[in-house]
Each structure stands twice: as structure tokens, then as C-alpha cells.
Amino acid sequence: RKEVEQDPGPFNVPEGATVAFNCTYSNSASQSFFWYRQDCRKEPKLLMSVYSSGNEDGRFTAQLNRASQYISLLIRDSKLSDSATYLCVVRESSASKIIFGSGTRLSIRP
Amino acid sequence: NAGVTQTPKFQVLKTGQSMTLQCAQDMNHEYMSWYRQDPGMGLRLIHYSVGAGITDQGEVPNGYNVSRSTTEDFPLRLLSAAPSQTSVYFCASSYSNRAYEQYFGPGTRLTVT
């Protein structure tokens, strides 16, 4: 079983739709969680951290469920510019171990 | 502020050749790391460094060497290139190994024939 698993997609949704994807992690001792965004043939960039209480940044909402060991990302009112691959990232209790999921590809159509 | 820079952007090697991928950052970050990204595999950590003079192995270190003689530079050396090392390589840095945000360079696309 992979340490961090994501549905690879692609998710193909119309502009304005709401889309959500999950990421599961295997190590219950994991401490920190993040979503990164990666555009085609570009480097990953931090989208948002994920806090235990959940957090929101504009149209983006991230949630953490420690009991079930998953994190989620919700995008409301999706824009064409949201088309990208979204990487789930987990930092384990040993701070040097940062694990990336293989990414979920999102495509927004006009 | 250039951030994290990597050279070259593209490279083709023959099996058995060696080369060094360069990485530099101008943000005075202590923590630097190298990842490789393959289709369907996500980013996998090759080596990392928590400061000048200190390096350690990540998940997939075989076939690669690193050194960290200065805070700014963290080169990755391929000792004897193999087709299995065909990948996109990203260098990243952060303020510390506990900082929540890593800054990535633009990547080096390496093909080994």
C-alpha cells in the first residue's frame, strides 16, 4: 500500500462546478499536511496547508480527518485556471520525511 | 531574488556517463532537497541537506551523490547514468526542515539512452 494515495483522475468538470478530491495516508503518526499545485511541465507550488480544524482560502477548502486518515480539497466555482495537478503532501513525525502523493489531475472545461 | 535555480533545463546522456545537476538558492534557506518525478509515482526524495556540510539519504539515493559546501548550492551528481534515471529532477529549499513551504526550482528533464 502506498504511503500517500490519491485518485489520479483526470477529473473533467465544467467551469463553475464544485469539485472535491481526497487523499489517504497510511502513517497515523503523520503530523503535517499540505496541498501543492503543479501546472503542466512546471514545478510544484504550495497551495495551502491543512489544519486539524479545516481551513479555507477563497474558493478552496481543505479538511483533515485524522480518524480516517484522509485529507480533502474542495474547489468551489471552479475556473479554467484551476486546471492543474493537485499533489497531496504529508510530513511524518520525522521532519525530514516528506511524502508526496502522485497527484490528481483536474481539467476545467468552458 | 531568483529563488531556486536549476541548470541545465534539459539533458541527454548516454548510459554510463556521469554529470552534475546544479541547484542554487538565494533565500538563505538551510534545508535543501532533491526529488525525482516519474509518471504515476509522485515526487520521490533522493537526498536532502539540513545545512552546509550535512547531507542525508532520502527514499531513492542509489546512483546519486550530493554535497553541500555552501548554504546556497546543492549539486546532485549522477555517477554512472542508467536508463532508469530518466526522469524530471526537482531541487527544493525551505527555511528549515520544519518549515511548511518548500520552494521548488523549475526542474531538469533528463533522458538517459
Image (tube, rainbow, N blue to C red):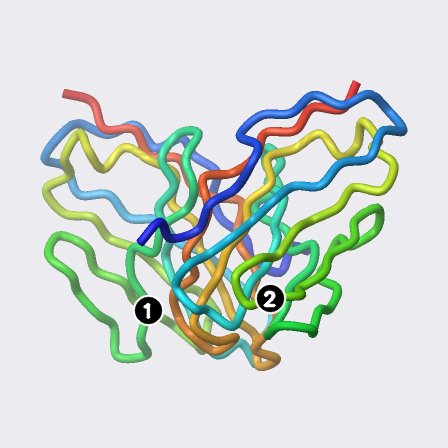
Residue A35 at x, y = what percent?
Answer: 36, 57
Vertical placement of residue A69 versus A104, above or below: below
**Disc 2 is attached to a residue of which chain?**
B
Vertical placement of residue B1 versus A96, above or below: above
Residue B76 at x, y = what percent?
Answer: 69, 49
Q: Nearer the viewer, mark 1 or mark 2?
A: 2
Q: Considering the image in quadrants, where does the N terminus of chain A appear?
A: bottom right
| Residue that label 1 marks | A50
Same chain check for tags 1 and 2: no
Separation of residues labelled 1 and 2 (CA atoms): 33 Å
Identify the image quadrant of residue B41. Answer: top right
| Residue that label 2 marks | B70
Viewer-proximal residue among A89 and B107: B107
Residue B111 at x, y = what percent?
Answer: 69, 24
Query: Quick one: label 2, few (<14), some, or many (20+) residues within 10 Å?
Result: few
**What's the amino acid at mark 1?**
Val
Question: Left or right: where does residue A69 sit relative to residue A1?
Answer: left
Question: Left or right: where does residue B4 sit relative to residue B49?
Answer: left
Question: Left or right: where does residue B37 sit relative to residue A77?
Answer: right
**Disc 1 is attached to a residue of which chain?**
A
Viewer-proximal residue among B62 and A89: B62
Mark on residue A70? none
Q: Secondary structure at mark 1?
A: strand
Vertical placement of residue B8 versus B71, above or below: above
Viewer-proximal residue among A19 and B6: B6
Q: Considering the image in quadrants, where does the C terminus of chain A appear?
A: top left
**What's the amino acid at mark 2?**
Thr
Residue A13 at x, y = what percent?
Answer: 23, 30
